[in-house]
Image (spheres, rainbow, N blue to C red):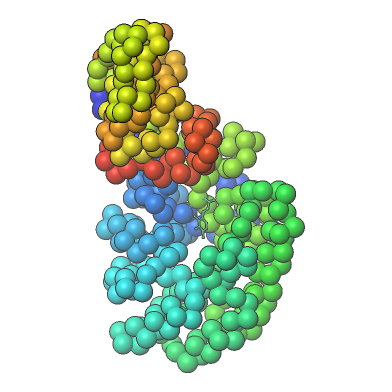
Amino acid sequence: MTKTAETVLEINLNALQHNFEYIKSKLKANTKTLAVVKAYGYGTDACVIAKHLEKLNVDYFAVAYVDEGVALRKAGVKTPILVLHPQIVHFKLLIKHCLEPNIFSERVLKAFIDLMESENQKQYPIHLKFNTGLNRLGFKVEDVDTISGYLHNTTTVKVASIFSHLVASEDLNEREFSENQINLFNKIIDTFKSKLNNQPIFHMANTSGIINYPNAHFDMVRIGISLYGFANDQKYTEQLRNVASLKSIISQIHIINKGESVGYNRGYTADRDIMTATVPIGHADGIHRSFGKGKGYVTINGSKAPIVGNVCMDMIMVDVTNINCEEGDEVVVFNNQQTIIDLASAIDTIPYEILTAISQRVKRIVK
Ligand SMILES: *Cc1c(COP(=O)(O)O)cnc(C)c1O
């Protein structure tokens, strides 16, 4: 593989395909798949990811906000797209691009139906979200009658799906809580079935729900982080492949004499003579400032080079005292799952945040 000459995020579509197929191998043959490509496809490139998954016959996509769905449509994505957290102010734009809203409260339901009436829409697909314990977004089981009332009085919308979200699907200490959520969702399904003319899709499981709760697969599963190589569980992460690799280059090497400092606010003072490499990637690119002062590292010619001093907006300086390297050499921030997991735990976060932090300034390259 040719070495990079600038800061890039490489996206490996073979790995994506492997991960999608691995997750599908955990499903019954008729379970539908929804690929979650919110937040630029977990920091990769939502359009590239979606176009590839569309070729693999994924049934649905989900994004968080309307703009994210519009970007997919503009890239030519034809598959249905569920918008998980649309804002009422964007409903017109949503319809224009055939995006399908999550409707999670009476206020949002009423606003959407009112707009549909004024636009003379018929049977526009909507998705009803139920809160079974996350207490974030969603109707309560007691709201079923109210919702049915609205639906019986209009032909503008049809319920394409009904869904809920698990609170702690990755945490087996919370198994009882999760099972209670699943039971509650089953109850919601039962109360709804008699009240709708069509048969909506029922769905509940995210990545860890797919792995840990086969009884939560229902008609469709929502595959997020596992598409990108993580399963919140070592055993399953090993079965997945890394999709995103973040690489850069050494811009300049400095000899730092004992007593000299490096970087803003003299975040590091040399207690011996060292050698540093300056790398063109900083907190504006997604290298969180808390990686400074040795908490984060990069890999150069196979050796770990810890970050020296504070992370700058556009650069980091790393310790290459014991590394055989020169200006222009490739720098790997991460190119495997374990490094991403290690970096995440070094600053008390999760791989989701490491990936989604990679800013749009970093050039994406598809491999
Ligand atoms: C983000 C999200 C998912 C995907 O979860 P993963 O843990 O990444 O698989 C699924 N459903 C909803 C509602 C989400 O917000």
Residue 183, picture quadrant = bottom right
Quick one: 109 or 162, which is closer to the camera?
109
Horizontally, residue 132 falls left or right of residue 18, namely: right
Residue 167, picture quadrant = bottom right
Determine whether 46 is above or below 325 in the image.
below
Task: Give me the residue at 51% from left, 32% from top.
Answer: 346
Image quadrant holding the N terminus, namely: top left
Quick one: 204 or 61, which is closer to the camera?
204
Q: How many marks?
A: 0
Q: Where residue 321 sits in the image (x, y, percent)?
A: 38, 10
Judged from this view, the residue extending furthest toward the bottom is 153
Task: Give me the residue at 54% from left, 80% from top.
Answer: 198
Horizontally, residue 148 falls left or right of residue 68, namely: right
Determine whether 284 is above or below 151 in the image.
above
Determine whether 291 is above or below 29 in the image.
above
Quick one: 207 or 23, which is closer to the camera?
207
For the question of whether residue 323 can be seen, the reply is no
Q: Where residue 197 sits in the image (x, y, percent)?
A: 55, 84
Horizontally, residue 125 falls left or right of residue 237, namely: left
Q: Where residue 56 sits in the image (x, y, percent)?
A: 45, 49
Task: Give me the residue at 68% from left, 54% from top.
Answer: 213
Task: Give me the residue at 30% from left, 39% from top.
Answer: 284
Residue 138, picture quadrant = bottom right
Q: Where residue 329 sits in the image (x, y, percent)?
A: 30, 16
Image quadrant holding the C terminus, namely: top left
For the question of whether residue 56 can be seen, the reply is yes
